[in-house]
């Protein structure tokens, strides 16, 4: 069975959507840990609800960069996961971590990459830019994590219309819904490719 860990910093709605699919039996996998740099975020609350061990690893808990990197790797090694799933993880990952887990870290981004990705395109900034550019379509992208931000092979995309009446908030809500539908399937399908 696919074993993965999650890294998240925020509300955790993607994390929750994945856990719900596992609980319902639609997605046969085991989530073995949550790493968060924010000990009070929504994602930590969901991990506790589902009995998933939480590791709070941040610049505060580990002010020394090398100790921070070692702490991340120690968790991944201890649980021996197939994949690490980023679900709204707001810190840039150390390159040692990315190299060590090459091809085994997935991320979801709230735009149709390669559009509206890279430095500065996070959170509401993405949706503001999409609306300002007059795009008629937006969506979400699941991709492998490479050393460049929002780079890496695209594994899945979900599309939504941009309506003339949209605000960044209304568009964000529509994109979030599609994220919840595509992320668990992309993890499942990529996991099958990896494990055969
Ligand atoms: C999502 O929009 C995702 O695309 C981005 O971070 C956000 C996380 O949202 N990487 P949530 O915490 O899962 O609600």
Image (cartoon, rainbow, N blue to C red):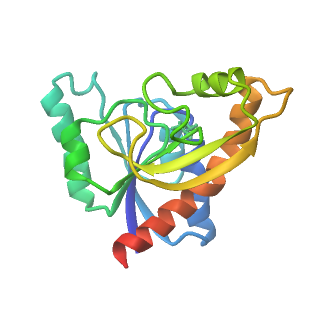
Looking at the image, residue 161 sits to the left or right of residue 151; the answer is right
Q: Residue furthest left?
A: 66
Location of ligand 1 given as a quarter of the image? top right
Total tally of numbered discs in the picture: 0
* Residue at 83% from the left image edge and 33% from the top image edge: 163
Q: Position of residue 172 (x, y in %)?
A: 69, 33
Q: Indicate the quadrant where residue 137 lies.
A: top right
Would you say 10 lies left or right of 95 here?
right
How far from the left and from the top, in percent, is residue 133?
Answer: 68, 24
Task: Please name the residue shown 66% across and 28% down the image.
Answer: 130
The one nearer the camera, 131 or 96, is: 131
Out of 118 and 71, give the one closest to the viewer.
Answer: 118
The residue drawn where x is 59% and y is 42% is 112
Quarter the C terminus occupies: bottom left
Q: Is residue 26 above or below residue 146?
A: below
The answer to which of 23 and 49 lies nearer the viewer is 23
Q: Quadrant of the N terminus?
A: bottom left
Q: Residue most toward the right?
A: 165
Residue 160 in the image: state x and y as whole percent: 73, 45
At 56% from the left edge and 69% from the top edge, which residue is drawn?
A: 27
Could you tell whether 84 is left or right of 190 in the image? left
Give the image location of residue 75, x and y in percent.
25, 49
Q: Who is closer to the viewer here, 173 or 116?
A: 116
Q: Is residue 45 above or below residue 63?
A: below
């Amino acid at each position: 069975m696919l074993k993965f860990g999650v890294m998240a910093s925020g509300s955790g709605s993607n994390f929750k959507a994945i856990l719900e699919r596992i609980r319902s039996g639609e997605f046969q996998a085991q989530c073995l840990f949550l790493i968060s740099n924010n000990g009070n975020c929504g994602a930590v609350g969901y991990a506790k609800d589902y009995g998933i061990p939480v590791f709070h690893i941040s610049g505060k808990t580990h002010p020394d960069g090398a100790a921070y990197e070692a702490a991340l790797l120690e968790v991944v090694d201890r649980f021996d996961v197939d994949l690490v799933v980023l679900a709204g993880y707001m810190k840039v990952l150390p390159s040692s971590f990315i190299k060590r887990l090459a091809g085994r870290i997935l991320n979801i981004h709230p735009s149709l990459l390669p559009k509206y990705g890279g430095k500065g395109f996070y959170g509401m900034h993405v949706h503001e830019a999409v609306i300002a550019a007059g795009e008629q379509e937006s969506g979400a992208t699941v991709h492998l994590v490479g050393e460049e931000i929002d780079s890496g092979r695209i594994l899945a995309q979900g599309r939504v219309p941009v309506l003339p009446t949209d605000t960044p908030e209304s568009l964000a809500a529509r994109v979030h819904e599609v994220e919840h539908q595509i992320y668990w399937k992309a993890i499942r399908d990529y996991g099958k490719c990896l494990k055969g």
